[in-house]
Structure formats: structure tokens, C-alpha cells
Image (tube, rainbow, N blue to C red):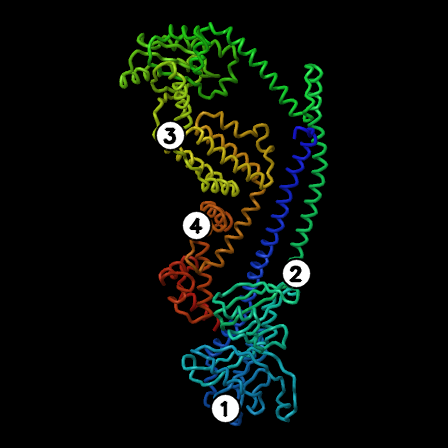
Amino acid sequence: MKKFPVQLQLFMILFLVLVIPMSIISYYSNTSMMRYSEQEIADSAMTKLDSNITLNEFALKNVIVDVLQMVKENKFNTIKNITSYTELNSGYEKINSAINIFYSMNEMLSNDSTVYSIYFYLDNADYVISTNKGIVRLEYFESMDWLEAAMNEISGAGGVWYPRILNKATVTEIEKGTKYSESIHVISYVYRLNRLTTSTKGTIVVNVNESKVNSFFNSNKYNSVSAGYIIDTKGNVISHKDKSLIHQNLSEVNYIRNILETSADSGYEYVNADGERILYTFYKTSFNHWIYITASSMDTLMEKSNAVRTNFMILTIVIIAIGTVITVLVSIRFSKPMKQLVKNMKKQAGFEDKENKNELAFLSTAFEKIREQEEGLHKLLKDRETETKYLAFHNLLAGEIANNAEMEEIKKAFPYSHYIVSLVSTDNIKSYLKEANPEIRSYQRYILFDKFENAFPEEYHVCCARYEAGTIAIIINMEYYDQVRVPKTLKNVLNQLKALAKEVRGYTVTIGVSGVHNGYDGIKECVYEASEAVKQRLLTGGNSIIFWESQKKENKKFHYSYNSEKKILNFLNNGDFDSLKTELREIVNQMKEEEDISNDNILLIFNQLVGATIKYLVEHNINTSKIFRSNINIYSVIANLDTVDEIEEYLIEVYKSILDYTAPNRENKEIKYCEQIIRYLDGHYKEDVRFDDIAEEIGISYSYLRKLVKEETGKSLIDNVNILRIEEVKNLLLHTDLSISQIAQEVGYRNIQSVIRFFKKYEGISPSEFKSLKQRDIN
């Protein structure tokens, strides 16, 4: 690489940095887009299928309800003994009874557009009462041979739905024997009168127009690309757009066979047919045990998705092309100063390196030569300062005693073999350095040197030295070390030093105290231990004295909680500032409770959290420079803070800035969350609803869920659920014969008492009173 110019190397690096990630992102995005688009289409198709089934079954159930209502009126009892057409016409009251039945059936026909015709046949009678042919002799009515097969499918007290072809011949055409081929596909609801409902023995037949059923089932805006049809559990077609397929058996068709054989109640399958990809969705319903199927063309459904993918590819190519141009310009721009620097160095220093065409290689060689020259100069200056006491103590702390002159100075100051080092570190050092200029700091330092050295008892030999900015090192030398007396004495003296430092500098200090070591070689270890003790300020807080302890669990690490990170980002996304602060406090509390956690480990945890936050902002296209402005280097700020509580306060300010900046976008999210919650309650209110499960499914906290529902509806979560249940109770009371106990189980209550209590709470009356009032209004 030394033979290639920097400009060319820079261009290659920048180009690869641009092209490789863009290529990977493009491939991954296209693949993901394809996969997720198909999944979304399938989910959407299942939802539309479910919606259409609900509409269809609602219409059919209305037919059943109307039949039961007509039976309940007991009008059939007036003709139960009249089996002869002649007898029926023999008197006004008899024919009027039949006409009343005819009017009731016509009223039901006029109220339901799905019904084609209705008729009633009394057992052993020679006549039929029909909405489309009136009261007519049985021999002039359509054939009832099919009725026996339908009767065989009836189980219990209910009726049965039976698909068939209805001949539309008139009475006159049947009477004359005219051949008439026009017919219509119907799904007949056959209801056999029984002892539970009436003493009359007969059969009510409601012929529902199959085309109406099919139109309900296919009532969506995707009719141009989707077709829905209904089959029974044997594969026989009940309803279809293609009328030629009705009553045909499709059980041998592969995808139909798969649907019939599967134990699943719903699902979907992709099938390739004649070069076209078809999405088949199905639902098996308990109502009639019908199977609803839709077939949708994926080629048509994926048109928009494919267009987006194509545009994305074009955009990627354009970005790479623009990036290439920018890369060339950047490489030229940034290599130009380096070329000029090399030129000047060659001209001024006379340095030549013909082997290296690469400017970086040339500069590396040149700087190495300069470094060697600086080291020689530094050594010369250092030798000239060896006679000073300050340098001797400073070198002693660093474990770098340079010569005999320094050693003699050290021996004179410290006659004994036992050493302890204390480091007095100013809290909130950044503010202190900003307020005090170098001259003031130097003046204060020498004042403290004098006060510190004179604060110790005479048996201790003490000297102070400048350790680093804002920190003073105290070297304590003693003849003997008593494990009880010495720590107690040091603690009393150091408490005085804390007060002195606060008085002189105006800031509190944290004092780290090392263990005791023997000889000059142990001084460096003392400094390390005292420094590590000061770092414990992160957890213990400032204005404290921290003694070094030999840590048996020195290598133990506090594991980073990715669950807490996920929660904080989730709270950030939802704008839940209170929960975010609580979770951050929990992280800090866990750190404080952990034993033997190191300073580096703590900073690593906060840096990981900050990194995850910045990644979140980038992924959501949030401009960090607008949020943080000049204070964008969060890592540096954290590293300069003294305690975890200060770091916590700083991060809370950071997250508040983010939330304030993103507040407008979050309002739209709240609307979407409310819609999801309402949809979930509408679909699950009959179940044992767990609100924390709703929150987890949507991706928000439980407290935030309650807040959204209260603001949107003005009611609590449980009130919303109970209102939906009570509305269903009212519906079941009016349209079914279910008991209160059965209704309670149907809507999700565990006992009758709960139904009655909540019904009175929201309606003001009991269920039985409500039902009586409504029946009185109808009558």
C-alpha cells in the first residue's frame, strides 16, 4: 500500500464504505419488503374474509330469527286440523286464518332482501301456503321430493340449510304441464314445527337467493382480484360466482383437499396455477359447518409493492452514483493538505524518502524521527530537574525514581518502610477547573499542601504532591502499622482535610485511601489503590472518604440489562417520561446494590444505553444535532461526571430533550394505539380480558394503556369491557331464548349475579325488566 498515493487509497476506502453497506441494505430491504408485503396481504385477506363471513352469517341468522318469531305468534295453530284445500275454502274464518299466515310470510319477505320466497306445508295437507304462488293445491306446486333428504339432515329442535335448484314455473304452467326450464339457485332454510314451539305439525321453508348470499360474501373493494365461495365439509359447492360449479364436488382439487383435511379452523395457502400465483384463504365456521374460501390474485395485489421495490432499487443506484462523485471530490479535498504538508517538510527539513509514494508512510517515517528527537530533548530537560523535591515525589508516585539524587531526597523525607497514599480529588472537577484559572489553582494547591502536612500527628511523616488536575496526593510514611489505631486516626485527620479543602476551594472533595505497603516499590501500588478507591465515588457519591479494600470478587461484572434497555426505548417511543425515569432509577439502584462493581463496568453500562438510544434516533430519522446542539458528545459528558446520580440526572435531561423534540409525531401514534385498543376490546370482550396482555401486544406500558383509554373514551378499561358485554346481553335477551345463566357464560361473566349487577349499573334496570319492557313495546 505504500506505493499507492493517499488520494487513491482514500477514494477506494470511501467507495467501499459506501457501496458495500448500500448493497447489503438494498438486498435485505427488497427481501424483507417482499416477505412482509406477502404476510400483510395474507393477514389483510384473512381479516376481510372474517368480516364478510360475519356479514353473511348475520343475514342468515336474521332469517332464522324471523322464522322463530313467526312460529312464536302461534298463527299456524288455527289451521292445524284443516288438511283439505276444499275444507280450507269452505268458510271465512278458515280461509282468513290461512291468509293471515300468508301475510306474515310476506311481511318477513318484504323485510329481508335476501329471501326469494317462503312457503308453509301442513303435514298430510293437499295444499301449500306460499308467498310467490299464494294458497295453492299441492299438485300445482313445485316438487317436494327434495324435502325428505333435507329433513334427514335436521338434528335437534333447529332447522337445516339445504342448497338446491328452485323451478320458477307458475301455477298455470304446472297445471297445463308446460315445459319450463327457468330456475334459480337457492339455499333453503327448512324448519320443522315441533312440540317445543307449537302443537301444529308442518314445515316452513324459506328460500334464500344464493346470488344474494354470494354478493354478501364478496362485498369488498377487491372483487376484481378476489372471488369468494362456500363449500360444505364434503367439498360440495354451496355458493359461487360461477353458477355452473354450484352443487359440484371439489374435494379432489389439491388446495380444497388440503383445507378439508386440515384440523385448523382458518388459514391461507399460496398456489401456483397456470403461471399465476393465487392466495387462498379459508375459515371453517360452526354455523352450518360451512367453509368459506376466497381466491385472490397475488400478481394484482403485489403491484404496488413491486413498484415500491423498483423505485427503491432506482434510488439506491442514484445514491451510489452520487456517492461515487462525492467520494472523488472528498478524496481530492482531504488529500490536498496532506500533500502540501509533505511538500513543506521535504523542503524545510530536507527529508527525502524515494521508496514511499504514499504520503502517510512518508509522514509516519518523518514523525518517528521527530519523536526520537523529542525524546532526547525530554530526557535532557528531565535530567536537569532531578534536584527538585517536587519531581522526586512525583516520580516516586509514578514508580519512576530516575537517579541517586532523587533517592537521597526521598530517603530524607521518608525514613520508615510503611506507606499509605491518599488522593484528595475535587468533586465536580469540570466546574472547578472552569471557575478557577491556573494561577488560582496553583495558589490554592500550595495552601492545602501546607495545611495537609501539618494536620497529621508527629509520628507520621507526610508530604504532598500534585497528582493531576484538581487532585492532590498525600504520601503518609510510618514506622509501625496498627490495623485498628491507624485507620481510625487517618479517618479523623482526613475528615478535617475535607473541611479544609471545602474552605479553600469552595468545592467538596472525595478522598481515596490505599492499603499499607512496604518500601518504595509499594508506592506505585498505593497510588493505584487510592485511585481505584476514588473511582468508587460513582456509587457512594462525593464528599466522602473511601478506603481501599482487597476485593475478593474483583473480576465480577455487572451484566447489562437488555430488558431495561428495551423498556426505556419503548417508553421513549411512547412518550412515557415517568416510566422512563422509573426504569432509569431502577438501573442505578441495581448498580448500587451490586457488590464489587468496577468504575469501568458502570461507564460501559451507561455507554451501551446511550449507544442504543442514538441508534434508535438514527433508525427513526431523528436529527440528533437539533436535539443536543453543541452538547452532542454524550459519552464525554458521562465520563466527566462524578456519581451515578449525576449521570442519571444528565440522562433524564437528554431523554426529556428527545421527548420534547418528538412530541408532535407521538400524537399520531397515540391515535393509532387507541384504534388498536378499541379493536382488541371489540373482538375479545367475551373472553377473560387481561389488560397487561393488551399492553404487551400493542407494545406500550399498562399505565400508558389506561391513560390512553381514559382520555379517548372518558371511561376506564373495565367500564369499556362491561359496556360491550351488556350491549351483547341486551341483544341476546331480545333475539334468543337463552337463559340468564347461558347469556352470562356467552358474554364472559362467570355467574348470573355479575350480569344482573352490571346490567343495573349501566341500564338502571334488571335484565328481566328490560326484556319485559321490550316485548311489551313490540306487542
**Which one is in front, 392 or 256?**
392
Residue 646 horizontal side relative to residue 48, left or right: left
Circle 4 residues within 10 Å: few <14, some 14–19, many ≥20: some
The residue identified by callout 2 is: 299
Q: How far apart are the two marked residues, 1 and 3, measured between alpha carbons?
A: 100 Å
- Indicate the secondary structure of the residue bearing disc 3: loop
Amino acid residing under circle 3: Glu
Q: Residues within 10 Å of mark 3 (few under 14, many from 20)?
A: few
Percent across and percent down for residue 691 are: 44, 51
Question: Closer to the observer: label 4 or label 1?
Answer: 4
Q: Closest to the observer: 3 or 104?
A: 3
Mark 1 residue type = Ala
Mark 2–mark 4 distance (CA, rounded to whole Å): 40 Å
**Rendered view: 407 above or below 230:** above
If you read the primary sequence from the N terminus, does the residue marked by circle 2 or circle 4 appear first? 2
Q: CA distance from mark 1 to mark 2?
A: 58 Å
Nearer the camera: disc 4 or disc 3: 3
Name the kind of residue labelled 4 in the image.
Asp
Residue 692, disc = 4
Q: Please tell me which residue lies in front, 597 or 581.
A: 597
